[in-house]
Amino acid sequence: MDIDFNKKASSEALSDSKKPMDLILVRAIMSCTTCGKEKKFRNQFLRKDLELMVVALKVFDWMVCNKCGELFRLDLEFRV
């Protein structure tokens, strides 16, 4: 019985945490100012896991272009 209770509780917690107001939608646009190459990435983060977004953005900030070796310019678009 405890297993059924835990399954129900965890599924309810997951469905509650996926409310649109709890999600931060992020689109990262990385572009090279030298050769013009552009990459786009989309991801979503829960508000309670904001530190995961910070870590991901720090990684993006240090990515370089594989054509010319220059650092990408990072532009972010948020939809809350």
Image (cartoon, rainbow, N blue to C red):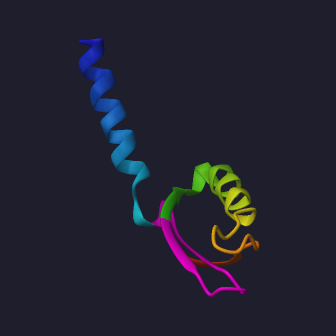
Across and down, in percent, residue 24 comes to 53, 66
Query: In the rendered view, does 63 fall on the left or right side of 37?
Result: right
Q: Is residue 69 magenta?
A: no
Q: Residue at x 47, y 66 (%)?
A: 21
Across and down, in percent, residue 11 comes to 31, 37
| The one of 62 and 50 positioned closer to us in this rendering | 62
Q: Is residue 68 visible?
A: yes
How many callouts does the rendering have? Answer: 0
Question: Splitting the image into 4 quarters, where does residue 7 fall?
Answer: top left
For residue 8, above or below residue 25: above
Of the 4 image quadrants, the one containing the N terminus is: top left
Q: Residue at x 27, y 30 (%)?
A: 8
Across and down, in percent, residue 41 comes to 50, 69
Query: What segment carries the magenta color?
Result: 21-42
Q: Residue at x 73, y 65 (%)?
A: 61
Q: Is residue 79 visible?
A: no
| The one of 63 and 58 positioned closer to us in this rendering | 63
Q: Is residue 23 magenta?
A: yes
For residue 16, above or below residue 42: above
Q: Residue extending furthest top?
A: 1
Instruction: Tell me the chief SS of the magenta region.
Output: strand
Q: Residue extending furthest front?
A: 67
Query: In the rendered view, does 13 fall on the left or right side of 26?
Result: left
Across and down, in percent, residue 12 comes to 32, 40
Q: Residue at x 51, y 74 (%)?
A: 40
Question: Splitting the image into 4 quarters, where does residue 36 fall?
Answer: bottom right
